[in-house]
Image: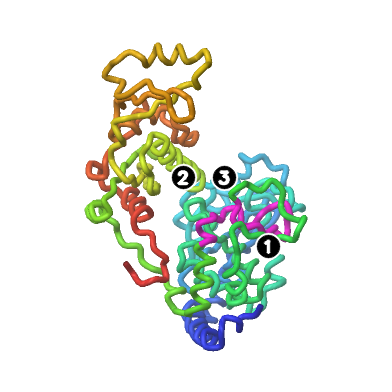
Amino acid sequence: MTAADEGPAQAAEADTIEREVGARITPSADFLARVSEVRAALVERVTAAAKARSSPLVRALVAGSAARGTFLQDRLDVDLFLLFPPDLPRERLREEGLALGRAVLSEPETRYAEHPYLRGKFEGFTVDAVPGFAITDPSHPLSPVDRTPFHQEYLAGRETPEIVRQVRLAKQFFRSLGVYGSEARTEGFSGYLVELVVIRFGSLRHLLVAARDWRVPVRLAEPGKEPPRLPADVALVLADPVDPNRNVASALSRRNLGLFILAARAYLSRPSARFFEVHATLPFSKEAALALLHARGTHVTVAVLPRPDLVDDTLYPQVRKAARAVADELSRSDFAVLGEASAADASSVVIVVELAHPRRPQVRVQDGPPAGIDRVGHFLEKWGAKSDQVLQGPYVRPDGSLGVDARRAERDAEAVLRAAFPRLSLGKDLTPKEAGPCDVRTLGEAAETPALAEALRALLARRLPWLDDP
């Protein structure tokens, strides 16, 4: 199948759009030359600093989009990798990496991933100085960044000027959908994954033609050569060419892959520059959410937890697990759950769940044993006497078992969730202690915070981004 298969009129329109978008997002020749000069100066400076302090640095390199020129005009990340001997203790790795970063960067700021790295300025550019190990076998990394030199070598040998142009278009396409970036908060396509799929299919358009017919999960790995131990909810499988045991797309969610598949089909059918526009995220106020809920006739329950001292990549998988646990608990408790969302800000984690009704029925059907077994006596002893807790029964159900209609003590969603919270498994850093801090309220009672606004938008403002604004 070729790009022309979407139809000659659509293909011509897409050609025009992509030329215009390409001109807008491509860095100028002067800027590319300046980045190249800064890369060389940065490596030279840090190498000299390592020599001056007798550091065990094996190699320094700038890798990623800054090295290959695949970055977008308004989005440049300069990543300086400081690689040390594999037998260097991790504590010394951190110490040396931060020291060398401080030696060459101004305005240094320590940040954290698996281990600390440094963000600062160098000749006007923002630079991340990231320590790692100088390994010889990319299938046995000692830290997440150790494969980087191998990725750099693999891509640099395959990216022609036309491929670079197509990579930029693809990055902008993914960015407009909000699915560009492999961070846990985004669960999208990493820059490396984008470059690999563009190389594989030859261009953005050829990628879209292939993707419009994909079904999740998608397997691009060769049969019998998939990375082992894939999770059950994998979205896309593509073996890392420098480490066949690794799935390059492991961070990608099924939701985001599904969104891309729909966008591929929509763009090929009706090309539009909207598919390359980054849409501003407007604030979503509690007032707007309450008005929308009134129109929908639904109810939102809000749970707020204190944010643990974790980086986003560690926190967000737990936040999503907590949201699923809260929604599942309400569903098991006979509330009709319409959706859930979650978010975190600097001080809190917020979970919002939309329910068809704020209160569950007064009656709860208590299942009993089948007639004729010994436990019948125990069931009748417990439920046979008339009381305020028995609304009807005991009686025999159509299947021959006993049942009784019992009165519920709690009916409001917030009261039910508040009582259940201590026993929920929310993630090791979010699960509250027996009397831990947990704030469960109706949306009307909840305090407005950045996390609440973000969670409400994810819950109540879902819409395909290339469509006209609602």
Task: Tell me which residue sits at (59%, 66%) in the image.
Answer: 194
Q: Which residue is the site of mark 3?
A: 114
Which amino acid lies under the numbered mark 1 shown in the image of this protein? Leu
Q: Which residue is the site of mark 1?
A: 220
Rendered view: 269 above or below 403: below
Q: Earlier in the sequence, mark 3 or mark 2?
A: 3
SS label for mark 1: loop
Number of residues whose C-alpha sits closer than 10 Å to that of mark 1, classed few (under 14), some (14–19) or many (20 or more): few
Which amino acid lies under the numbered mark 3 shown in the image of this protein? Glu
Does residue 37 appear in this view?
no
From the viewer's side, name the closer residue of 203 and 392. 392
Q: Which residue is the site of mark 2?
A: 320
Task: Tell me which residue sits at (53%, 71%) in the image.
Answer: 264
Which amino acid lies under the numbered mark 2 shown in the image of this protein? Arg
Does residue 410 appear in this view?
yes
Task: Tell me which residue sits at (57%, 70%) in the image.
Answer: 212
